[in-house]
Image (cartoon, rainbow, N blue to C red):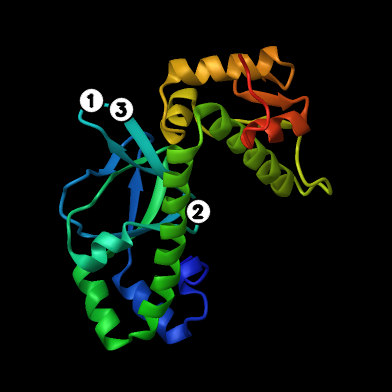
Amino acid sequence: MVADHNDFHGLSQFQVLCLLQIAQPQTWQKNELIFEQGSPATGFFVVKVGRVKVFRVSPTGKEQILNIFEVGDNFAEAAALDGQPFPASAAALDWVELIFFPRQAFLELLHQDPGIAINMLIGLSQHLRHLVGVIENLSFKDVQQRLAEYLLNLSNVSSQQSGSCSKSSNVITLDLTKSQLAAALGTIPATLSRVFYHLSSEGIIVVSGSQIEVLDRDRLQNVSQALEQYS
């Protein structure tokens, strides 16, 4: 599992064995808090099974999901490296198996073999690019645009996972609850429901529980790019 992790591609067998020596398996129940914003950064994690959300909560209690990590992804490595408290919280979206790398043991390993650190920088840069995208969406796009873009991306991912020759799938299943999706899109469930209603009433999508059928992909694309407005 460690050898298959994105940040550890290209490592020698010896380097992988060194990592395995400090790795600690962990399991977490669905919705269980893995760590809390502001708590000491004790190490970083690799997802072996399930999904983990990393999020912040405003003083008023509004949750903003910053990222969702799936099998093979790592998270919390920045705080583990600089020794500062965790800048956000993390919780299990499903029943989760993680591989935990204690901070001190990992730092000692990096001093012995700096080559491992180079691989870590790749993962850090990817996370930074993702956060820039989150900030851009929250700053420059309204909720309707964000939802349209999310549905289009999920449609493309669904098609890839099914092995379809088509670039996108017209019937998709939401991978988050409506509350979680609202938090990921930087809004509240009531506003998200209104946007779903608008897209449905305009004949662009059909909503049936967690299943969404895209009826007019071109118009959904226009919405994501603010080329189509509603009164």
Give the distance between the C-alpha atoms of the residues marked 3 and 2, in whole angstroms: 27 Å
Q: Is residue 75 above or below residue 191?
A: below
Point out the frontmost of discs 1 and 2.
1
Residue toward you, 71 or 152: 152
Residue at 70% over, 33% down: 222
Left or right of 148: which side holds 4? left
Q: CA distance from mark 3 to mark 1?
A: 6 Å
Q: Nearer the viewer, mark 3 or mark 2?
A: 3
Is disc 1 in contact with disc 2, using a CB cutoff of under 8 Å? no
Amino acid at the residue labelled 1 = Thr
Q: Is residue 196 above or below residue 32?
A: above
Question: Which residue is at a point 50% across and 53% down the rendered structure image?
Answer: 71
Asked if residue 51 shows in the view, the reply is no
Circle 3/circle 1 CB separation < 8 Å: yes
Q: 56 left or right of 190? A: left
Residue position for label 3: 62
Image quadrant occupied by the C terminus = top right
The secondary element bearing badge 3 is classed as loop
Check disc 2 and report the residue beneath it: 71
Q: Amino acid at mark 2?
A: Val
Q: Which residue is mark 1?
A: 60
On screen, residue 78 above or below 226: below
Can residue 148 be seen here? The reply is: yes
Report helix, strand or loop for mark 2. loop
Q: Earlier in the sequence, mark 3 or mark 2?
A: 3
